[in-house]
Amino acid sequence: MKTKYFFILLSIFLISFQDAFSQNTANDGDWSQNAVILNNTPQADLMIRLGDIDNLGFGFENDFDPFCGKSTPAHIYPWLINPDDVNGMDRIILPSSYVKRNVPCGIDGYAESYDTSKTSPVPYEINMFFTKELVITSALIQIFVDDFQSPTLCSRFQVKVNSMRFKELEQVLSLIDETGQIGKVITLNFPTYLLGELKKDKLIISIDDPVSGAGDGYAIDFIKILINPKPYAYLGTIKGKVVNEKSEPIAGAIVETLNKQSIKSASDGVFKLHNIYAGLNILKASAEGYLPGFVNADVICSEENAEDVVIKLRKKKSFAFNGKSIFEGDAININNIQFKQNSFELSAEAKTELNKIYDFLAKNPEISIELSGHTSSEGDALRNIQLSKDRVFLCKEFLVKKGIKANRIVAIGYGAENPIAPNDTEQNRIKNRRVEMKILKF
């Protein structure tokens, strides 16, 4: 507790110096302002920013450019809430599904500050009346993110623009592992299917993990949107190599960024991607017969990474389960683990199927699995998510009581978001009330 008070005092000290880091630039206006709209900047026809540019109130070092791609130095937790900041920015946020129990993969230090009145996710709202007459052909979104740790803590973040899911940004957040309280900028193309949202009266951006229960605290410094962007100056080069488990090169692997820039690896496995947005990037490599591989890559503006980014791919493995071959990464529906509407009681048939999973895990102690719960679409969406969580944790509890270690089972409730049949008949809705299993790792 003394440590926490020390951090609070240090935060006050640092925040008192944030004005020393304030700037006023043609691209972003006054960095100390929480809402800025600029027409015809060097970067875009229209720039919209929500949140000040001040590294969560700690300020940036002299000559540090947060758009150039470098990580901030590690900092203490932003325990304090500055009432002058945009609600939900420059503070610790914890997923709405985190309730200090049934966490899938542990918690981070931010979770110590759990307080629903202070740490709950807040939608970020921007009035968009000034875009009504603007012809929008493309857009970029930039977010300065801090301490997302999905790979380590098994979080499952969802991003919505108004009511629509922003899948590309979700994928980025699912692969970030920012241990050590550091911040980085993400720059993504605004997908075509979301451009229409920029013409509405309001743009509401929400970031939350409503399903996993993970204790993955995070913070957002600012969100910036560039409408009809001009040629972007903050670009760099990524070079690397795609190899197999024996570090042998893989030729012809497809290497791509989440902004859909791609290239094939050469005969020696080497690749080089030019003109990549500076900041945090996720590279994906895929090749026939291998599991896709992902790696974080920091791109610094006007630079090429000194050390090669190595993306290691592993051959897919298969195991026999219930008389069928199941491949790592593939989800299979577990027959007979289905539920009546609004129910999460295990039937005798469900216990029979869970015993098959127990036998499978007992015989293959090197395997970890994901159990995902799904519901039909009747009723409230949040209620469905909670119901699917209750169901799948009941399945996990059954297996753990029989002797399977809890850390071998990641349990997630998705609610009604991933139906396998239309929710138009009771027979189809029964199909959607299910539990699926996916082999995660060996």
Image (spheres, grey):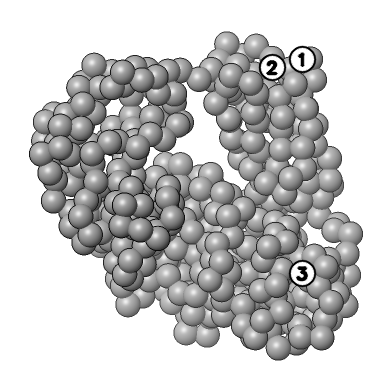
Judge whether 282 appears above or below 60 on screen: above
Q: Which image quadrant: the C terminus?
A: top left
Task: Work out whether mark 2 precedes mark 1 in sequence or the reverse, and give the earlier one.
Answer: 2
Q: Which is in the foreground here, disc 2 or disc 1?
A: 2
Q: Are marks 3 and 1 in contact (CB under 8 Å)?
A: no
Q: Amino acid at mark 2?
A: Ile
The CA span between labels 2 and 1 is 7 Å
The residue to which callout 2 is attached is: 250
Q: Residue at x 57, y 11 (%)?
A: 246
Q: Is residue 76 visible?
A: no
Task: Work out whether mark 3 precedes mark 1 in sequence or the reverse, and give the earlier one.
Answer: 3
Q: Secondary structure at mark 1?
A: loop
Q: Is residue 80 visible?
A: yes
Q: Amino acid at mark 3?
A: Leu
Q: Are marks 2 and 1 in contact (CB under 8 Å)?
A: no
The residue to which callout 1 is attached is: 268
Bin the neighbour count of mark 2 within 10 Å (Cα to Cα): few under 14, some 14-19, many 20 and up. many
Q: Secondary structure at mark 3?
A: strand
Q: Residue at x 40, y 23 (%)?
A: 326
Q: Could you say which is closer to the camera, residue 422 or residue 386?
A: 422
Q: Residue at x 30, y 57 (%)?
A: 426
Q: Could you say which is closer to the camera, residue 1 or residue 402?
A: 402
Judged from this view, the residue extending furthest toward the bottom is 129
Task: Work out whether mark 3 precedes mark 2 in sequence or the reverse, and give the earlier one.
Answer: 3
Q: Are marks 3 and 2 in contact (CB under 8 Å)?
A: no
Residue 249 placed where, x, y %?
Answer: 69, 14
Q: Which image quadrant: the N terminus?
A: bottom left
Bin the neighbour count of mark 1 within 10 Å (Cα to Cα): few under 14, some 14-19, many 20 and up. some
Tell me if 80 is positioned left or right of 46 in this view.
left
The residue to which callout 3 is attached is: 226
Q: Secondary structure at mark 2?
A: loop
